[in-house]
């Protein structure tokens, strides 16, 4: 599956949530073993960076683990998720994260707000998990220009109304200068000089997040999953022949604050030239 959130129109911030068929909750592909090996390495070597848990998130985390333990054998009978070593005492959200390529975030309702209470995020797109734990949806998205005025209230309300019977999914996208999934630090894409035009398509990557939202019936928490897909722009054009036109149209919808947030200040012109060539 090659997800393409672009639609040939100027980019506009929107929730864009669709109803999720639970059979499609989790996705498994040829990178499964490699992605899980990387997750296991990160959880061992950088646990404080990729795992963050508050006591309030424990019940939801246990529920997520149990849901995966029944979902995976049913939909992926041939899958052999990694087995814990004897005596390994991992938090249930870490155990759950070691069964799937997705990153996992548990949100709990606290004083009327949805707050991040447990997360195993090995493949963040340039954000720092430790700064997000315990924060509300509005607080988590504080660095995102226009989030609060454009979709903040609607996202809060979507969370309040979410039901176990009607899970949702949506897509996010970005352009980044590395195919590496683990990007824990908010850095701009700086290296415009390296991107002399003809090499640009091999040096920039179209990074998409397929995100799902699922209300957990027992704990009342909400599970947010993030599955990251990365392809070079060259590969993307092979898969989506209209991609150049789509990205050119999309970029006309982004103001300076958003270009800055996305980290594209150094590459915007080169990217536009490439898109319009
Ligand atoms: C329907 C639900 C949600 C919507 C509509 C939404 C929307 C967005 C948008 C538009 C961005 C900016 C992305 C970009 O242009 O590059 C963003 C970033 C982000 N979102 Fe969400 N989001 C949702 C749920 C969540 C949840 C539940 C979490 C929990 C961890 C989360 C964590 C983040 C983080 C960490 C960032 C990056 C913020 C930063 O740069 O510091 N989002 N989100």
Image (tube, helix red, strand yellow):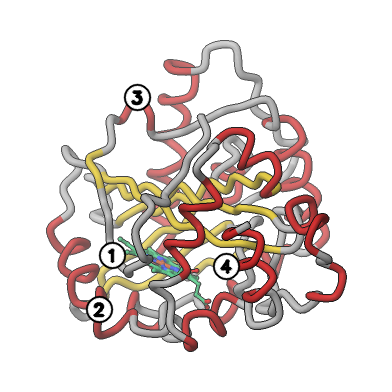
On screen, 195 above or below 206? Answer: below
Count all numbered tags in the image, as a single digit: 4
Which sits earlier in the primary sequence, circle 2 or circle 3?
3
Which sits earlier in the primary sequence, circle 4 or circle 3?
3
Which sits earlier in the primary sequence, circle 2 or circle 4?
4
Q: Nearer the viewer, residue 108 or 165?
A: 165
Which residue of the protein is positioned furthest toward the left in this rendering?
A: 161
Q: Nearer the viewer, residue 65 or 185?
A: 185
Label 2 Cα crowd, 10 Å radius (few <14 / some 14-19 / many 20+) = some
Residue 224 occupies which quadrant of the picture?
bottom left
Secondary structure beneath label 1: loop
Residue with the mark numbered 1: 14
Q: Residue at x 66, y 56 (%)?
A: 122
Which residue of the protein is positioned furthest toward the right in this rendering?
A: 194
Residue with the mark numbered 4: 52
Residue 189 occupies which quadrant of the picture?
bottom right
Which sits earlier in the primary sequence, circle 3 or circle 1?
1
Secondary structure beneath label 2: helix
Q: Nearer the viewer, residue 150 or 185?
A: 150
On screen, 77 above or below 1? Answer: above
Residue with the mark numbered 2: 150
* Residue 138 percent across, percent down from the top left: 33, 81
Quote the CA–CA distance across marks 2 and 4: 28 Å
* Residue 112 percent across, percent down from the top left: 18, 77
Taking the image as four quarters, which one is ligand 1 found in?
A: bottom left
Q: Residue at x 70, y 44 (%)?
A: 234
Q: Is there CB contact under 8 Å for labels 2 and 1?
A: yes
Check mark 1 vs ligand 1: CB closer than 8 Å? yes or no. yes
Residue with the mark numbered 3: 23
On screen, 275 above or below 229? Answer: below
Mark 3 or 1: in front is 1
Secondary structure beneath label 3: helix
């Amino acid at each position: 599956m090659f997800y393409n959130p672009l639609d040939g129109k100027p980019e506009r911030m929107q929730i864009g949530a669709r109803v999720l068929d639970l059979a499609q909750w989790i996705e498994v592909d040829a990178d499964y073993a490699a992605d899980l090996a990387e997750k296991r390495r990160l959880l061992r070597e950088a646990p404080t960076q990729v795992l963050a848990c508050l006591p309030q998130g424990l019940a939801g985390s246990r529920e997520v683990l149990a849901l995966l333990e029944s979902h995976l054998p049913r939909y992926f009978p041939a899958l052999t998720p990694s087995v814990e070593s004897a005596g390994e005492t991992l938090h249930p959200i870490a155990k759950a994260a070691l069964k799937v390529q997705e990153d996992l975030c548990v949100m709990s309702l606290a004083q009327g707000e949805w707050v991040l209470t447990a997360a195993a995020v090995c493949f963040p797109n340039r954000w720092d998990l430790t700064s997000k734990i315990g924060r509300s949806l509005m607080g988590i998205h504080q660095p995102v220009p226009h989030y609060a005025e454009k979709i903040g209230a609607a996202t809060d309300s979507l969370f309040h109304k979410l039901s176990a019977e009607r899970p949702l999914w949506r897509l996010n996208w970005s352009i980044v200068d590395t195919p590496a999934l683990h990007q824990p630090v908010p850095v701009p894409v700086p290296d415009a000089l390296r991107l002399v035009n003809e090499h640009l398509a091999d040096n920039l990557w179209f990074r998409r997040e397929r995100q799902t939202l699922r209300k957990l019936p027992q704990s009342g928490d909400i599970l947010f999953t993030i599955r990251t897909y990365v392809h070079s722009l060259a590969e993307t054009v092979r898969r989506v022949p209209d991609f150049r036109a789509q990205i050119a149209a999309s970029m006309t919808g982004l103001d300076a604050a958003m270009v800055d947030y996305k980290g594209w200040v150094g590459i915007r012109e080169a990217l536009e030239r490439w898109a319009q060539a």
